[in-house]
Image (cartoon, grey):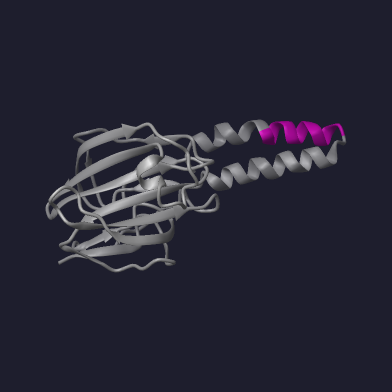
Amino acid sequence: MVKDGYKFAAAPLLFGVVALGFHWNWLGAVLLVLGAFVLFFFRDPERTPPSDPDVIVSPADGRVMEVVEDARGDDPGRRISVFLSIFDVHVNRAPVAGRIAAMEYRKGSFNAAMRGRASEENEQNVIHVSSERGEIVFKQIAGWVARRILCWKAVGDSVTRGERVGMIRFGSRVDIWLPDRAEILVRPGQHVAGGSSILARWR
C-alpha cells in the first residue's frame, strides 16, 4: 500500500462509521465504499522482474493503446503507450536498470489520457534512463481525472529494473520510447503489469 492511501481513505472511512452511528445508513455505506476504493486504488503489490538481462519491462500496469514509429531527433525508435484505468495499479516502475540521466516536468493540458494528443499536450513528467544498452525515455502523463504526478527519484539516482519510481493518481497514461535496436514484443490491446510484463528485448 502506498502510504498516501491511508491519508486519503481515513476521512471517508471515519465519517462513514460516524454516519452509521447516526443511522444514516445510505450515507455511511457510500462513504465506506469510497474509503475502501481509495485503499484499493493505492495498492502496491510486489512484482518480480524477469531474470533475462536483455528484456525491457513495462513501467506501468494497464492496456497497451498503441505502438507507433517515433523518432527522437536523428535517433529512430518507437513509442509504446499504456493506458491506466482507475482499476489498475498506479505505481510506476523503472523499465530497465540504469541511472536517471535527466528529468523534466512539463506543464500542460488535462485531455483524456486515452487520446493520442495526450502524449504531447498533457501535463507530464519525462524521465530519461541511461542503461548499458542505451537510453530510453518514459513519461508519466496526467489525464482528465489524474491531476497529480509523483516521482520518488531524482537525476543521478540509480534504479534497478522494476524498481518503484513514482505514481499517478486516479487514471492516467505512461509512454515509453525505445530505440530501433529494441525489438517490440507487445501489441495494442494487450494488458501489461508494471515491473514484470516484457515490452521489448534488446537486439
Front-most of residues 67 and 43:
67
Q: Quadrant of residue 168?
A: top left
Question: Above or below — where is 46 with respect to 202?
Answer: above
Q: Is residue 106 left or right of residue 38?
A: left
Magenta span: predominant SS is: helix
Residue 46 at what x, y percent from top left? 41, 53
**Magenta highlight range:** 12-22
Q: Is residue 67 left or right of residue 129?
A: right
Q: Is residue 166 visible?
A: no
Front-most of residues 70 and 202:
70
Rendered residue at 41%/40% (across/down): 122
Question: Residue reaching furthest right?
Answer: 23
Q: Is residue 107 visible?
A: yes
Q: Is residue 129 magenta?
A: no
Rendered residue at 57%/48% (across/down): 40
Residue 141 at what x, y percent from top left? 40, 43
Residue 2 at what x, y percent from top left? 47, 40
Question: Above or below — where is 139 with respect to 19?
Answer: below
Residue 175 at what x, y percent from top left? 34, 51
Rendered residue at 48%/43% (across/down): 111
